[in-house]
Amino acid sequence: MAFETEHPVFRALRERLLLGHWLPGTALKPADIADELRVGISPVREALIRLTERDVVQNIDHKGFNARPIDPHQAILFCKMLSQMYLDSISDFTKAKLIDEVAASFGGEIEPIYASNEEPAKLFLKVGECYRRALLVKQHRHVADHIADVVYVYLSRAMGTRTYYSDLLVESQSISALILEGQHKAAARAIQGFFRRRVAEVMRAQARLSRMPTATNLARSHVDLSRPGGA
C-alpha cells in the first residue's frame, strides 16, 4: 500500500490540513497526534514527512513540524496550473478519441460521490480527487495532487465556510453534467471559469487581509468572502 496516498494516518492528517483544522504555524506534535488518533508515532511522523513534501507542512531546520503558511501568489499560480492541466488533458483525450470513454468512466466514479451524505467540505475533497484521477492524463496526476492540496489549504483558511463548500459542489456538478452530456468544449470553458473564480477569491482574500490590523491574519481567523462584508 502506497503510504503517501492510501495510508489512513496520512489521509486523516491531510484532510485536517486541507479543511483548515490547523491554522498556519500551529505546531504538529507527532506524539500528541498519535494519542489523538490512537496510533503509533511512526506512521504519524511518516505522514508529516510526506505532507512536508506536498508543501502543506513545514519542518524548518528540523526543529519540529508545523502547518505551513500558504503564499497567496503560490495559490494563484497553482490555480492557473491546474486549469491548464485539465484543458491539456481534455484536448489530449479528444485527439486520441478517448474522451467519451473517459467521460463514461468519470460518470461511474463521480455520481456515487455526489449521492453520498457527507458534509460539503469533505465531499468536495473527494470530488476533487475524482476529477484529477479521471480527467487528467497520467503524467499530470502526481503534480496536480500536490498543487491542489496547497490551493485547498489556502481556500479553507480564507473562505472555508459550509456555504462556500456547498457552492463549490454546485459548480463542480454543473461541470460534471457538461462532461457527461458530451459537451466537452463547454466543460473545458467551465473548468477555466471555475479556476478563474478561485483566483479572484484568493486575490480578494489577500486584499481584505492587507487592510486588517497586523495582528489579524489567516493565522487568527477565517475571512468569509462568501457573504458581502462577512468576516
Image: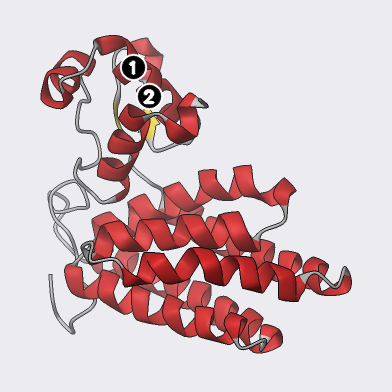
For residue 11, what is the image quadrant? top left
**Type of residue at label 2?**
Ala
Secondary structure found at label 1: helix
| Residue 20, horizontal then vertical, whole percent | 23, 49
| Residue 2, horizontal then vertical, whole percent | 52, 27
Q: Which residue is mark 1?
A: 43
Observer-nearest of 189 and 102:
102
Could you tell me how many numbered marks the image carries? Answer: 2
For residue 69, what is the image quadrant? top left
For residue 161, what is the image quadrant? bottom left
Secondary structure found at label 2: helix
Does the rendering let one see residue 77?
Answer: no
| In this picture, residue 90 sits left or right of residue 45 | right
**Type of residue at label 1?**
Pro
Query: What residue lies at 55% left-to-right and 72% top-to-bottom?
Result: 107
Query: What residue lies at 25% left-to-right and 69% top-to-bottom?
Result: 208
Few, some or many C-alpha atoms within 10 Å of disc 1 (few <14, some 14-19, many ≥20)?
A: some
Query: What residue lies at 31% left-to-right and 61% top-to-bottom?
Result: 123
Q: Which residue is mark 2?
A: 47
Where the C terminus falls, by quadrant? bottom left
Q: Can you say whether 166 is above or below 27 in the image?
A: below
| In this picture, residue 120 sits left or right of residue 71 | left
Query: What residue lies at 29% left-to-right and 16% top-to-bottom?
Result: 64
Residue contact at pointers 1 and 2, CB within 8 angstroms: yes
Few, some or many C-alpha atoms within 10 Å of disc 2 (few <14, some 14-19, many ≥20)?
A: many
| Residue 79, horizontal then vertical, whole percent | 53, 62
| Residue 181, horizontal then vertical, whole percent | 61, 88
Observer-nearest of 56 and 122:
122
